[in-house]
Amino acid sequence: MIDFPWFASYPKGMPHQINPDEFGSLPDMLAVGFQKYANKTAFIHLGLSITYTELDEWSKDFAAFLQNKTYLKQGDAIAIQMPNVMAYPVVMFGALRAGLVVVNTNPLYTPREMEHQFNDSKVKAIVILANFASVLEKVLPQTPELKTVIVTEIGDLLPFPKRLIVNSVVKYVKKMIPKWSIAGAIPLRDAMAQGKGQSLAKPTITGQDLAFIQYTGGTTGVSKGAMLTHRNIIANVMQMRGIMGTRLNQGEETIVTALPLYHIFSLTVNCFGLFMLGAANLLITNPRDMKGFIAELKKVKFTVITGVNTLFNGLLNQPEFHQLDFSGLKVAVGGGMAVQSSVAENWRKVTGVSLAEGYGLTESSPVLSCNPIDGSSHLGTIGFPLSSTEIKIMDDDGHEVAFGERGEIWAQGPQIMTGYWQRPEETDKVIKDGWLLTGDVGVALEGGFFKIVDRKKDMILVSGFNVYPNEVEDVIALHPKVLEVVAIGVPDPKSTEAVKVFVVKKDPSLTEEEVREHAKANMTGYKLPKYVEFRTELPKSNVGKLLRRPLKEEEMAKLAKK
């Protein structure tokens, strides 16, 4: 066995290798969790706590409905389109137990995006929150294979009368459910009732069978579906257990899940990973409602929280957050985008816990590397490769670069997807001899740690020099009057490109000159922003990741008009 340099940095108890075939399928893995943690709390939402046994029974009822009361057969695709509500784990686990392939769909998708995803993945059924059913109604005529529609409401799984109260407030007081009419739509509660008492035939599933067609954000063109097998997800869960088990105790943890479970990070790490540690999962439906979010945090003594940089930054800018009890907090993990050093440092000051940055992609189920969670994180790095994972830094010709030099991050491990759904040519571009070409620029550091420099496609070329937007953003974010910042490259006749930054103020008194002086004091000349534009908000993805592409497109559209 090769003795990789990162092994020396592994915390005590973290294995060098995991067994991705420890379970034959995800239903086999779930069955172990249901039995092992039977009376422990599995999920918490809107004040309702359900045990692992209740989750077992509810998801079985839904699985039995799918098998016995629909025309769906093993291997068919089912879309799930809802935020973090109690129905999500029930439906998702049930679909997998029935042998179906899950297609997670962002509830905020436009009709065009839904139509593309549903037709591309050939979904035969969908479970959707009623809040978004009016959009689905517009799409159905263009998605002929989608025959089975199951609709749920936010409070559906709450006990009576709270169920009625919550659903009535959402529908009639807050008016969050636009009118819709879909012939033959089945209420989720009816589906579960029909499945109750029905037999559930255990499908014959192998580790190589598809579990998810998980769509990428489409930031490089048309959205593509990453084919993730049962073995891929199981491997990543075992890898999570390998590092999380060095700090967390089985059956004793409570994790805050603010990122949506339909996102691959939250799906694997929070939903599956902490499930196999017997944790209680606190579901946050709308983390953008910071006051409501913090009110939920006050109700539980949470021990783990995951999120993206903007989520942590948003919490830190709420005075009420500083008053929370952090005595139980053990682990905080940031992923999905780079964690800025100013946010990480402020998080540690406020909570007393280091913010451990991890790294991964949808194509890798998603986690490839993570910082140690014992407080010894290396700020500004993505940590070391997980168990059974290799990372190397390569040049454009496919040769490994010298230690400390920049290059593209290539990764290999049992969590790597089998390819893009129905896109062999796209697959061949990113998978070479079992290695995933991430498209991220990185550098290898001492002790087997790695650092992300930037996305290759986001790199700004200024007079022949490479400028990495992450670096510019990280520096400007250190200014005490800056709340958020995005840096992009814009065409420039003298230097090919120039740096432009978009800034959201934390302090209204912030001036353009202050931004420039701060940048000048911390970066060399060619990296300095030539243009500074203040905005009240910046474009973000559904999980709060700051997006450069819309701003880049906006700038290019302005130029086209000149």
Image (tube, rainbow, N blue to C red):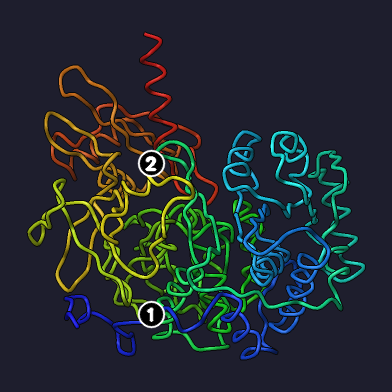
- Above or below, comparing residue 317 to residue 64 in the picture: above
Q: CA distance from mark 2 to mark 1?
A: 32 Å
Q: Residue at horizontal 85%, vertical 48%?
A: 171
Q: Nearer the viewer, mark 2 or mark 1?
A: 1
**Position of the N terminus by quadrant:** bottom left
In the rendered image, which quarter is residue 504 located in?
top left
Q: Position of residue 326 (x, y in %)?
A: 51, 76
For label 2, the residue is: 485
Give 444 or 351, whichever is nearer the viewer: 444
Residue 523 falls left or right of residue 485: left
For label 1, the residue is: 243
Q: Residue at horizontal 31%, vertical 76%?
A: 388
Residue 146 marker: none
**Position of the C terminus by quadrant:** top left
- Above or below, comparing residue 126 to residue 279 in the picture: above
Q: Residue at horizontal 53%, vertical 70%?
A: 270
Give 484 or 207, whichever is nearer the viewer: 207
Among the two numbered marks 2 and 1 on one chain, the one whose residue lies closer to the N terminus: 1
Q: Amino acid at mark 2?
A: Val
Q: Position of residue 225 (x, y in %)?
A: 50, 49
Q: Position of residue 495 (x, y in %)?
A: 16, 24
Residue 190 falls left or right of residue 49: right
Q: Residues within 10 Å of mark 1 (few under 14, many from 20)?
A: many
